[in-house]
Image: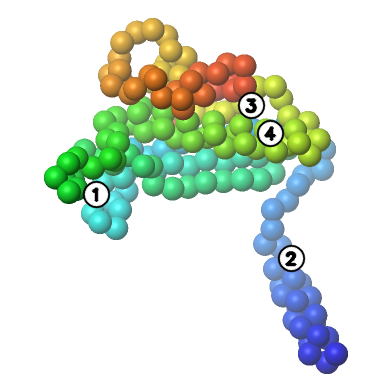
Amino acid sequence: HLGSLNALKHVFRYLKGVQHHCLENKAGVRTGLKVSSDSDWAGMYSLCGEKRSRTGIDVTYDDMLVCWKTAYQQCKGSEYTEMAGKMSEAIIATSSAEAEVYAAADAAKIAMHTKYFCEEIGVPVPDKVPIAIDAGAAMGFIANTGTIGRMKHIDLRQSWVDTLRNKEAIAFHRVPG
């Protein structure tokens, strides 16, 4: 019993010391579910020395952070490597707009997952999850304005592009960078 009591005291001392290191939910804030994404095109060097883009995503509910992600994108900078006599499977992001599109696609996946989870547990969420991005060119690609641009090389048959353009479930809006 003495060991359990000492462990319990240790836990309470720890909690007392970190009581101000927490996420807060502000009373009366009712902004609902919001998602934002951003990317840094070829701004980071990976451990193997290649230029990589980074994605950052945050999900808030009533202005309280509930989910976030920061990671290298699967696409590389402008390099390619030979692997067993053939080109590597890595996608090459050729512009900041393309890197923003990849970040928006990741944000859409996380937004839909969060929306489905909230619906299952009875938390009210909007029909269209708002996702904030700061790239006008990416917004044009997502809106599919029909003009042929510098990102026409992205394979439009991929399902993640359809997810981005699903106006029934997701509402992208542009915010200042």
- The residue indicated by pointer 2 is 19
Q: CA distance from mark 1 to mark 4?
A: 36 Å
x and y percentages locating residue 10 in the rendered image: 75, 81
Q: Secondary structure at mark 1?
A: loop
Residue lying at 30% horizontally and 53% vertically, measured from the top left: 46
Mark 1 / mark 4, whichever is N-terminal: 1
Q: CA distance from mark 1 to mark 3?
A: 34 Å
> Residue 168 vs residue 101: left or right?
right
x and y percentages locating residue 42 in the rendered image: 30, 41
- The residue indicated by pointer 4 is 116
> Mark 2, residues whose alpha carbon is within 10 Å: few (<14), some, or many (≥20)?
few
- The residue indicated by pointer 1 is 50
Mark 2 / mark 1, whichever is N-terminal: 2
Q: CA distance from mark 3 to mark 4?
A: 11 Å
Mark 3 / mark 4, whichever is N-terminal: 4
> Residue 21 vs residue 6: left or right?
left
- The residue indicated by pointer 3 is 129
Q: Secondary structure at mark 4?
A: helix
Q: Inspect the image, locate mark 2, and give the three-letter code of the amino acid beneath it.
A: Gln
Residue 150 vs 118, above or below: the answer is: above
Looking at the picture, tell me which residue is in the foreground, 170 or 140.
Answer: 170
Residue 80 falls in image quadrant = top left
Looking at the picture, tell me which residue is in the foreground, 145 or 155.
Answer: 155
Q: Secondary structure at mark 3?
A: strand
Mark 3 / mark 2, whichever is N-terminal: 2
> Residue 101 vs residue 76: left or right?
right
